[in-house]
Image (spheres, rainbow, N blue to C red):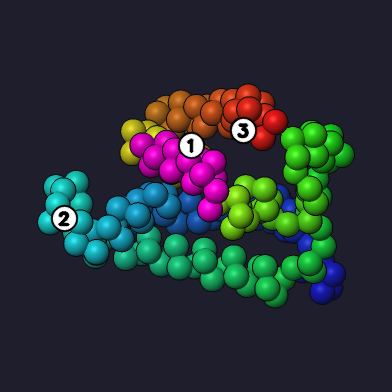
């Protein structure tokens, strides 16, 4: 039994749990999204003094902050108590492609050290990547009216056309990053 718990949960277990969550949110008149929590946290921190965008009743979003807290706690429990520490399953083709770009130990860590290690992050190239990527994610999230989780899970489950367009854009952006920009940055 314990061996089953330490494996990634299959789609037919986690998928219905996500669907149940979405049904409950719709029944209670809520919509799901993680990026809205950043707006709430900025409002709690006093950003409303500087921008009208942050002037709203953040207490109405306490339930969504609980979702973030639950996500953090759930991730901690999954990594520290429900993981057997085995390497991440990565296809041989992906390992070969990433190795050609200079990535070592592909699949042994969740985050590759060539991007997320302190040496990489504190370099000029790493800092530039973080600043530009952070700006693009922040701008894109605001411009699209939500993040990937909000559009892909909540928006699509509510059959919203803007969410479908946003999700298609997210996938196109991911493909462009994977096949064009990442090789330019690490070749």
Label 3 belongs to which residue?
Answer: 185
Sequence-first tag of 2 and 1: 2
Label 1 belongs to which residue?
Answer: 156
Q: Callout 2: helix, strand or loop?
A: helix
- For the record, the magenta segment spans 122-139
For residue 66, what is the image quadrant? bottom left
Q: Answer whether residue 127 is magenta in the image.
A: yes
- Total marks shown come to 3
Q: Callout 1: helix, strand or loop?
A: helix
Structural crowding at the residue carrying mark 1, measured as other residues with C-alpha within 10 Å and reported as few (<14), some (14–19) or many (≥20): some
Structural crowding at the residue carrying mark 3, measured as other residues with C-alpha within 10 Å and reported as few (<14), some (14–19) or many (≥20): few
Q: Residue at x 67, y 68 (%)?
A: 79
Residue 101: image x %, image y %?
74, 35
Asked if residue 87 can be seen in this view, the reply is yes
Magenta-drawn stretch, dominant element (helix, strand or loop): helix
Disc 2 and disc 3: Cα gap in Å? 38 Å
- Work out which quarter of the rendered image holds the N terminus and state it: bottom right
Q: Residue at x 40, y 29 (%)?
A: 162
Q: Residue at x 84, y 36 (%)?
A: 96
In this picture, residue 43 sits left or right of residue 49: right
| Nearer to us in this view, 151 or 29 | 151
Is residue 165 positioned above or below 6 on the image?
A: above
């Amino acid at each position: 039994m314990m061996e089953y718990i330490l494996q990634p949960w299959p789609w037919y277990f986690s998928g219905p749990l996500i669907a149940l969550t979405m049904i409950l949110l719709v029944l209670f008149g809520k919509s799901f999204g993680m990026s809205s929590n950043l707006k709430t946290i900025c409002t709690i921190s006093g950003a409303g003094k500087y921008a009208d965008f942050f002037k709203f009743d953040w207490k109405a979003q306490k339930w969504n902050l609980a979702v973030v807290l639950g996500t953090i706690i759930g991730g901690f429990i999954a990594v520290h108590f429900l993981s057997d520490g085995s390497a991440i399953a990565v296809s041989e083709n992906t390992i070969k492609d990433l190795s050609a770009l200079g990535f070592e130990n592909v699949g042994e860590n969740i985050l590759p050290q060539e991007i997320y290690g302190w040496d990489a992050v504190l370099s000029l190239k790493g800092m530039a990547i973080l600043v530009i990527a952070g700006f693009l994610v922040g701008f894109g999230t605001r411009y699209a009216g939500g993040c990937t989780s909000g559009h892909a899970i909540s928006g699509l489950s509510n059959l919203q056309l803007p969410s479908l367009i946003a999700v298609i854009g997210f996938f196109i952006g991911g493909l462009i990053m994977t096949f064009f920009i990442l090789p330019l940055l690490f070749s």
